[in-house]
Amino acid sequence: MNRKLPEEIELMRKAGKILIDAMCYAKPFIKPGISTYELDKLIEKFIIDCGGSPSCLGYEGYPACSCISVNEMVVHGIPSKDIILKEGDIVSIDLVVGYKGFNADATRTFPVGIISEEKRRLVEVTRQSFYEGIKHLKVGQKIGKVSHAIQQFVEKNGYSVVRELCGHGIGKKMHEQPNIPNYGREGDGPVVVEGATLAIEPMVNMGRKEIGMMKDGWGIVTRDGLPAAHYENTVLVKADGIEILTLGCDD
């Protein structure tokens, strides 16, 4: 678990600010009729104009600035001119922004127009599961306490957590150690240290936990075809608590 220096944390704060400003900028455009390709291009231009870099673009060959996943797509949806948002959809936007060599990572799941009560509740439980998890993110605690709390909250509300994908450390690299599952035992995982920067990201399915991969090699979908939601922030662990580096946009 890498500790970050004060000057490195400042760069991550700046990356986080650009990221969440990009989310807030994109939010009014999330309406029926827009393609996920158009959304991605709006976001990419905004990030670059703010002095940041879209870290996902080109990462292991990924072809876009953001991952935009609609309804049953859990994560890693490639933006496309052929995917047009419709009334009642939910859409997750996952962004990683770089600034002077350091990264921040966050995801929000947005409604498209008026959505069903079932989808609204899924989105809210997913968001709240993040906050239930970080209650246990403290120096000296095992990271498994966070994972366990997320799982308990999600399953108590009748949903399931994805097992194959997880949160992670973040800093110079988009993905650093440790891996942070959204399930598990309280005593699992490494001990949390001061100065750690972590991307905590519950991925929650309305139905069963099983997932499958699309033919494009990126998109991950629920096997039962039911919707999924995703909520993520980059979090700094401090001696006296935590600081969320990607907070804003109606959070």
Image: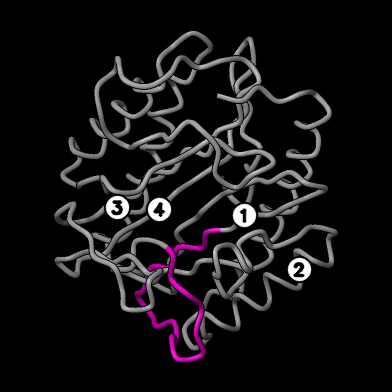
Region rendered in magenta: 76-94
Residue named by callout 3: 121
Query: Please, what is the three-letter code of the amino acid marked with disc 1?
Result: Val
How far apart are the two marked residues, 4 and 1, measured between alpha carbons? Answer: 14 Å
Question: Is residue 82 shown above or below 214?
Answer: below
Callout 4 touching callout 1 (CB < 8 Å): no
Picture quadrant of residue 136:
top left
Residue placed furthest toward the bottom = 82
Query: Please, what is the three-letter code of the amino acid marked with disc 4?
Result: His
| Discs 3/2, front | 2
How far apart are the two marked residues, 3 and 4, measured between alpha carbons? Answer: 13 Å
Callout 2 touching callout 4 (CB < 8 Å): no
How many residues crowd around disc 1 within 10 Å: few (fewer than 14), some, or many (20 or more)? many
Residue named by callout 1: 96
How far apart are the two marked residues, 3 and 2, measured between alpha carbons? Answer: 30 Å
How far apart are the two marked residues, 2 and 4, measured between alpha carbons? Answer: 22 Å
Residue positioned 25% across, 39% down in the render: 154
Q: Quadrant of the C terminus?
A: top right
Does dot 4 land on a helix, a strand or a loop? strand
In screen coordinates, is 92 left or right of 59? left
Residue positioned 73% across, 43% down in the render: 102
Does dot 1 land on a helix, a strand or a loop? strand
Residue named by callout 4: 230
Can residue 206 be found in the magenta stretch? no
Q: Position of residue 209 (x, y in %)?
A: 18, 52
Question: Is residue 93 shown above or below 86?
Answer: above
Residue named by callout 2: 46
Q: Position of residue 51 (x, y in %)?
A: 85, 59
Callout 3 touching callout 4 (CB < 8 Å): no
Picture quadrant of residue 180:
top left
